[in-house]
Amino acid sequence: MASATVYRKDYIPPTHWVDSVHLEFDLHPQQTHVHSTLIIRPNEDRINNDLVLNGRDLELVRIVMDGRELDRTEYTLMPNGDIVLRGITKEIKLEIENIINPQANTSLMGLYLSKGNFMTQCEAEGFRRITYYPDRPDISAKFTVRINAPKSVCPVLLSNGNLVEEGELDGNWHYTCWEDPFPKPSYLFALVAGNLKCREEKFQLKNGKKALLQIWVEPQNLDKTEFALESLKRAIAWDEERFGLELDLERFMIVATDDFTMGAMENKGLNIFNSRCVLATPEVATDRDFARIESVIGHEYFHNWTGNRVTCRDWFQLTLKEGLTVFREQEFAADMLGDSTARAVKRIEDVRYLRDRQFTEDAGPMAHPIRPESYEEINNFYTTTVYEKGAEVIRMLQTLLGKDGFKRGLEQYIRDHDGSSATCEDFLNAMAEANMRNLSQFTRWYSQAGTPHVRVRTHWDERSATYTITLSQFCPPTPGQTKKEPFFIPFDVALFNSKGKPIALQLQAETNAKGTSRVLELTDEEHSWVFVGVKEKPIPSLARNFSAPIIVDYNYSPEELVFLSQCDNDAFNRAHAMEELSLLCINEMVSDYERGTRMVINPHYRNAFESMLTDKSISPAFKAIALTLPSETRIAEAQPMINPISIRAAIRSLREQLGRQFSHLIMRVFDDNAPNPVYSPNAADAGKRAMRAFCFELLLAGGNAKSLLRARQIFETSKNLTERLDALRIIVNSASPTKFTLLEAAETEWRNEPLLINKWFTLQATATVPMDECPIVDVVQNLVERYPGYNAHNPNNVYSLVLAFCQNNLAEFHRPDGVGYKFWVEQVLKLDRINPQVSSRLARCLDGWRRYTPECSKLMFSALKYVYSQPNLSTDLKEVVGKALN
Ligand code: ARG
Ligand code: ZN
């Protein structure tokens, strides 16, 4: 099927409104009956009165309008499955009956089965797979729902809002009725039915009311829900406190399912989560998992205001709710951490993720502004650009307006648009009005794709004691956008004297100095700022705390980077300086490797490394993140031509040399960082564990034989997954044959716990050394084809095995013989038949084909071409591969 492009400029308000909808379900795995009753009235502002009801893969039984059944000539069935009713000029009552087959639904959109339980996912356009409806976010209606189901299979029946009735039916069936007090668009509808148990609590809200909180899971998982419930309570209290936003429901439910394409979904009052974003005990979740769970619980909860009470007018506005909610989630997570270095660690992690994934996206064939102008398949635009870069754009507003000003703007936005659907302009207007600021240039962040570069030039004039900073911006072209207008860039700077102290800042036009850091507002292509009273040549700290999603081009000397890695009082930039040094070092080693000369560690990096390793004044968590070597993706981003094999060789040699040269020191640091024996996922303990894992990896790389025994012992005796998994990973990535015994032991222990078996997949998929000379692609292929616990219908299985390999194991995936790409072709095509969102996500691993060595690049190109030539591709896959080839 030819996929049609949808354009943002083509938006037209709906022809009709839906005042209310009543849905009745008779649940059956293959034959679920849906009976919907809609009250529909024309939109007086529109002349067109043809009513389009979207439908996909539905079996229509009947349509009844105002009590009279329509015959086949009275409506049009479109080839895509939609129904058109012509000339609807007055209010009507429409009753529609249709049948759906949840069991055959492998796309996980609409109503589907997960281990025998009924689940729904409607965002973005899944509701049309449940019943005929004007499935667009600018139509909100009051929903009531009745669910009928056999009691034995479905003891629990849930939908949005409040439970208003329940009872018994003949033949051992029962029913529940739900009423959602808030009008909502169809994408926020949810239904869950099955054999589930819940942990619940009545929670005291600030307004005096109490709300019932429930976490619903499969019975065997009930003991893994405590952390999620605690996180939910923290999220509720935080939104009250920070933004004055209260829970508006008597009942708030979260449901976990193993079968879910994304992380989670904010359905009104009934959030549905991928189980990996809910379930946690020290035995099945790592420190990172705990942190992620708290963030995602917060994220979905915060959507209740930013997403649900105020929703999006159309799907182009997705970042309006997602960018804003990711930002809120990040602020929540930071506030829960409290102290400033712990916050900085979180910020460093978030920015690294952005740099690894979003900067790559912005530099590739799928580059798009945070608000795209067009799409073929909206599901392809749930991207790191819309989410994470979108959050950076919101963060820049907070930086420019201040925390209070930002809060005022958010209050105004919600006041102005509560109960309706909004656009990104609406949001910016509220921010501008509440703060009496002109933000018109700022809107370019919403319309221009690409990562801007800011070039920095500095000049210290001894005679006049002035220091001039000149910033100039440039944004490389992206598909469809060759020329870019200047962005509005908040650029935070500080200046350090030779003693490592920040100096008081005074600009030429100012009468006195104020503060030791300053947010410069770059709006032109180029601008200079002159600081006065600068008596010695300072060292600048630039774009502090990552004040804008940009790349800073400044020629620091290695000495200056060492200085900043030791003295910068912005913890983010301190770690950033360390990262720049390590990149400098690794790049030199990559060149050594490619020239065939001995790889040597840059002495400046070596010094900075040693001094940070031994610095007693900084927390283990900060040390661990600052010392962790950059990811291969990050290193690749900075290379003119990517050769994953040289990158891996350089990293391996660097680890080995560091491990050898500093073995005594590292051993001491290891011993100094013994975490509390009673496990807690708190940031301080997690930091110690991270520091230990880092030490371990270097020691083993450096050939320390005792560390292998020690790692094995930790894997076998530790009670928490963080330590066990770190130990096992280090062994798997070593040459030691123990890995086979341990992987087997892990499999025996973990095979019945999906969360753990997924970790087991990822360990092997991301292994950095072949297993018994068997390339990792063969290991992965073997698991896909022969391991009984792998199920291609389960997205988590695919992500943790196939995607983890193709996306994160660069050197093994990009083998010059092309076996990795051959595997990719097979998997993409196979998965496309099952779940297009999964196949198109996997397909994006070849986005960067132009940037690899000529031999890889050629093979990648033919793999893409081959996929593109196949018949019956999904619109999702077709768009992604088509754009990659363009
Ligand atoms: N709105 C969800 C979130 O919290 C994501 C849902 C995406 N679903 C999809 N099928 N693309 O971010
Ligand atoms: Zn979201």
Image: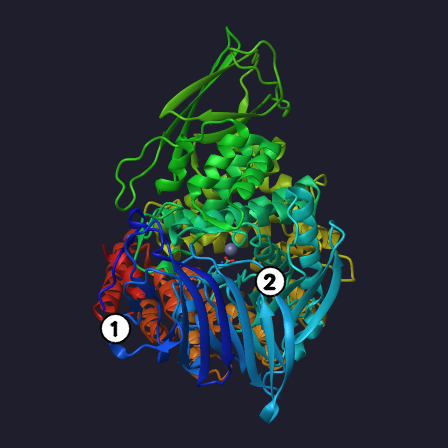
- Tag 1 secondary structure: loop
Cα separation, mark 1 vs mark 2, equals: 38 Å
The answer to whether residue 861 is left or right of residue 443 is left
The quarter of the displayed image where residue 866 is located: bottom left
**Residue at the spot of label 2:** 269
Look at label 1 and name its amino acid: Asn
Q: Kindly tell me whether mark 2's CB lies below 8 Å from ligand 1.
A: no
The answer to whether residue 650 is left or right of residue 572 is left
For the point 49% across and 31% down, the residue is: 432
The quarter of the displayed image where residue 17 is located: bottom left
- Compared to 535, does 655 lie above or below? below
Residue 20: x percent and y percent? 49, 64
Crowd class of label 1 (few under 14; some 14 to 19; many from 20; radius 10 Å) = few
Q: Nearer the viewer, residue 617 or 148?
A: 148
Look at label 2 and name its amino acid: Gly
Upstream in the sequence, badge 1 or badge 2?
2
**Residue at the spot of label 1:** 872
